[in-house]
Image (cartoon, rainbow, N blue to C red):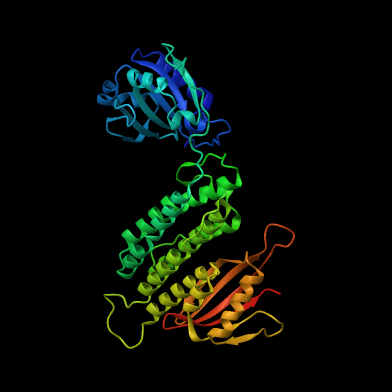
Amino acid sequence: MSTSQPERDMLHAITEWARARSAIRAVLLTSTRAIPNGRIDALSDYDVILVVQDIHPFADDRAWINDFGDVLVVYWDPIQPDPDFGIDYIANVTQYADGLKIDFTLWSVALFQQIVAAPALPAELDAGYLVLLDKDHLTHTMRAPTARAYIPARPTDTEFQTLINDFLSDPPYVAKCLWRDELLPAKWCLDNDMKHIYLRQLLEWQIEIDHGWSLPTGSLGKGLKKHLSPETWAQLEASYAGAGLAENWAALANTMALFRQVAIQVGAQLGYAYPHDLDRRVSAYVDQIRRMEPPTAPIQNEPSPESQTDQTLATIMHFHATFNTHDVDAIMRLMSDDCVFENTAPAPDGTRLVGQAAVRAAWEALFRDSPQAAFAVEEAFAAGDRGVIRWRYTWGVPTAAAGHVRGVDIFRVHDGKVAEKLSYVKG
């Protein structure tokens, strides 16, 4: 793959191609290659708007896309009316065999004239544009881009609460699908609805708070990794999983934990309250479904080694995600009445705590003394009723008082609850 020719040569080729065709009256470049300080690499697209006398000849005879190289594959939108002005347009995405990719949008002159006369540019143009060709001075009265089209607006309290409510409406459905072993609808709701629609919006709000509501967001989460903290990005990665049921139960718990964590932070910075009671009730309902016997499982006195291992892994990952919420009531609901916790201090043997009251007191002290405490999973695995999580524990705020340490928890799970948690830390 040659990844096509240099940008200057490509733009010249597009311009001269259009100049030679009387039906094309103007050409504009948009998106990454037209936005100031846009990040361009060898695979960056060319987003080109062709302003033509009539879009239909270009839609009827599509051979013109071959003028720019060997077409590998092309996707065409149907002809459809512009949502603001009601005039038809058409677009395509053309991938060429040499690596060149051009997204063509075709507007009629009539549509373009209305866009230019409108009180504000559409988002695609307001983000940034370059006029490559204008045969009829159609662009002379165009507004300059403000570069604010893709900057999220500060949400109102109602918008904030609606986002949380809508996010929390999804976990019961994902849990039901996982319980039924229906992977596709579970993954669609978990990865698209919960993460791309709701969690991504929340993360973008957090980024905007950090940047004074001045940073354009990338489509589909582009740029998130660059602007999120390493710890938050690691938590986001942990919210994705493959096809296994246990890992998807863990991904659901991790997604809910990350959303809760960021929503509480965003709400505090905006002065909005987080609906803890709704969260607790939804989390309890999801956990109830997780602990139900699968509908197709045979009746048996003891679980098979494979199913027990999956249940153990799902239980400890759910416990871990809940632990990061600092909700002691929710944590203790996931531990047995006779639970055991062995702390890492004091050396050499740590402290052994037995029973709900003693373990609860330990968690309350931990979260009181370290309100920023967070554990990121580095690795997790299980065998039968035993499970292991390697973690990285961070505390404090990004100052000299902050720090981290790495360690391991060894779990024993009984009847879907953590019966034993033995903690070890690097010295």
Q: Is residue 77 left or right of residue 9?
A: left
Pick the residue in front: 299 or 208: 208
Above or below, 80 relative to 419: above
| Extreme residue toward the left, this view | 60
Q: Residue at x 50, y 23 (%)?
A: 130
Above or below, 396 relative to 20: below
Q: Residue at x 36, y 14 (%)?
A: 21
| Extreme residue toward the right, this view | 400
Q: Residue at x 41, y 11 (%)?
A: 136
Quarter where residue 41 is shown: top right
Pick the residue in front: 40 or 121: 121
Image x and y of residue 142, in percent: 46, 19
Any part of residue 422 in sight: no
- Position of the C terminus by quadrant: bottom right
Above or below, 189 relative to 385: above
Number of labelled discs?
0
Image x and y of residue 183, in percent: 33, 63
Quarter where residue 67 is shown: top left
Any part of residue 75 in sight: yes
Image x and y of residue 242, in percent: 41, 62
